[in-house]
Amino acid sequence: GQAREQGRALMGRTSMGHVLLLATLSGATPARVPPADYEHVALTSPSSSLAVKVYLPYLPPTAPSDRPSFYTSSRFDWGSMVGDIRIGSSHVLCAADYWRAPHDPAWPEAGVGLAGEFGCGDDGATCGAGWGAPGGQVPLGNGVLGYEEAGPGGVFLKLGVGALKKGSCAGCDPASADDLYRFNSPYAFAEVPRWHVNRTGAHSLELSHSAALPGGRWAYALRRSVELLDAPDAEASADDTAGRVRETWTLTNEGSETFASPYYSHNFFNLDHAPTGPGWRLQLQGVRAEKYTDGNISWAKPLAKYAAVGARGSGEVGAQSVLWAVDVVAGERLKANFDGPACAFAPSGAFVLSHGALSMHSTQCLRIPAFEQACPSPSAVAAAPPASCCLGGEGEGKGCCQPPLFAFNLYAEAATLSPEPVVRVELRPGQKATWSRTLVVSHSGDDRVEPLLAAAPARAASAAAGAARA
């Protein structure tokens, strides 16, 4: 239909991309190519102040391409590869040739920019309690459907990815029915995922995908859209260069079993190919920054080594802020898990990440009709605010009534600074959920770093010393 014809127009008619994809899915290592040579669609805002590249998933068999797909691994949603975000003519965010360079499409971590994952970022077929949200009808899955019931070499689904073979990853036990699911290991595909791409407007794109296991118990359909818009007047002054990236997905449970999973955008933020370091400020909305624990992982460095964090740093930093003070050198990684809120209103996952004159304001909302129907009216919330409902907020969060967040994490390396608000999705058969996120990117044209940053290293050192004494 229309999607197929759009796919032909977008992807071309030769078959080299198909050859490279099959090599990847069969375990071979295809030749690496520059990110600019991967199949993508360039989108710009109406004023051309903001531009992005949407790296396309493979579209078999209707539109084989002479350019390979950017991501062919088994962790991230194939339709979420939005990167190379250019604001004005001078700054590039989420550069595709900077994170995990040189780029390897078959590497599970080799997403770009706003790449998202259904799952909690841990091993195992199920996830923990997160912030302790009320339990649902079923255990919270790790983005996989039918994994535990699949036998050795059997087939399971990864949401946003497709049908995978159990026991096929490096380190897996192909003979064990109880083999641990490893979220960050590449699994072999049971079949080539099928996607459709529609150019829905001059500034927008839609991607759709579905997958199912035999028998009808486990099946889903996923529809994504990416649209670029100019920034509203409230978000930018007359002197700013600004624009918005609005992305949405709708997930439908097309099987006969209820399933549940976390979802998050990894937000691989980097600026102008520079390492993570002084100048970055993260402001959390509805979450107290100093209420966190460092990741309980052998490789995780303590956040206080690199940043002044809320009240642990200085009153100037702000209770909801993280002010970066020290460069993250190559090979170092850190992860911080923020505590759940103590306030009556559950945070929606909004944050502001800024560097000097550059600012990114992210707002989001997860809409599940069955949950929204159970939400109290705004007047009832004003009288007795419930802990499980988020009403109000800004951007996508305005008027949003959503389940509590599963978690809010912060991940960083030299090549990324990644705030990760994580939502929890649960769908009964036939139900659908819609997640929307708007990222407002603005730049004032003045690259001077805030004076506050001059004292940041001393505050970070003080914070680290305080943490050591605690």
Image (cartoon, grey):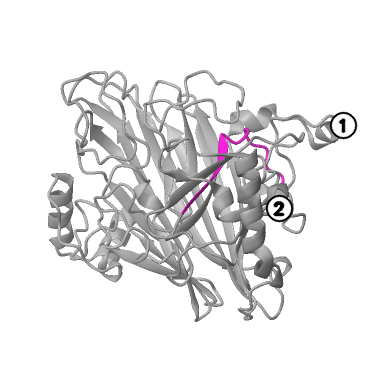
Question: Which mark, residue 383?
Answer: 1
Quarter of the image where one finds residue 290 = top right
- The reply to whether the C-beta atoms of the residues labelled 1 and 2 are less than 8 Å apart is no
Q: Is residue 216 visible?
A: yes
* As drawn, 80 above or below 84: above
Q: Residues within 10 Å of mark 1 (few under 14, many from 20)?
A: few
* Horizontal side, residue 364 vs residue 81: left or right: right
* Horizontal side, residue 291 vs residue 299: left or right: right
Name the residue at 61% across, 78% down.
Answer: 447
Quarter of the image where one finds residue 191 = top left
Q: Which residues are magenta?
A: 398-412
Q: 155 or 90, which lies in front?
A: 90
Label count reads 2
Q: Say which amino acid is labelled 2.
A: Glu
* As drawn, 417 above or below 25: below
Q: Position of residue 319 (x, y in %)?
A: 73, 49
Main SS, magenta residues = loop
Name the residue at 56% across, 77% down.
Answer: 47
Q: Is residue 128 magenta?
A: no
Q: 203 or 300, which lies in front?
A: 300
Q: Is residue 322 visible?
A: no
* Horizontal side, residue 447 vs residue 8: left or right: right
Quadrant of the rendering where the C terminus is positioned: top right
Q: 208 or 116, which lies in front?
A: 116
Q: Residue furthest right?
A: 383
Residue under numbered circle 2: 394
> How many angstroms separate mark 1 from mark 2 (CA)?
21 Å
User: Under tag 1, what secondary structure?
Assistant: helix
Name the residue at 34% across, 66% down.
Answer: 97
Q: Say which amino acid is labelled 1.
A: Ala
User: Under tag 2, what secondary structure?
Assistant: loop
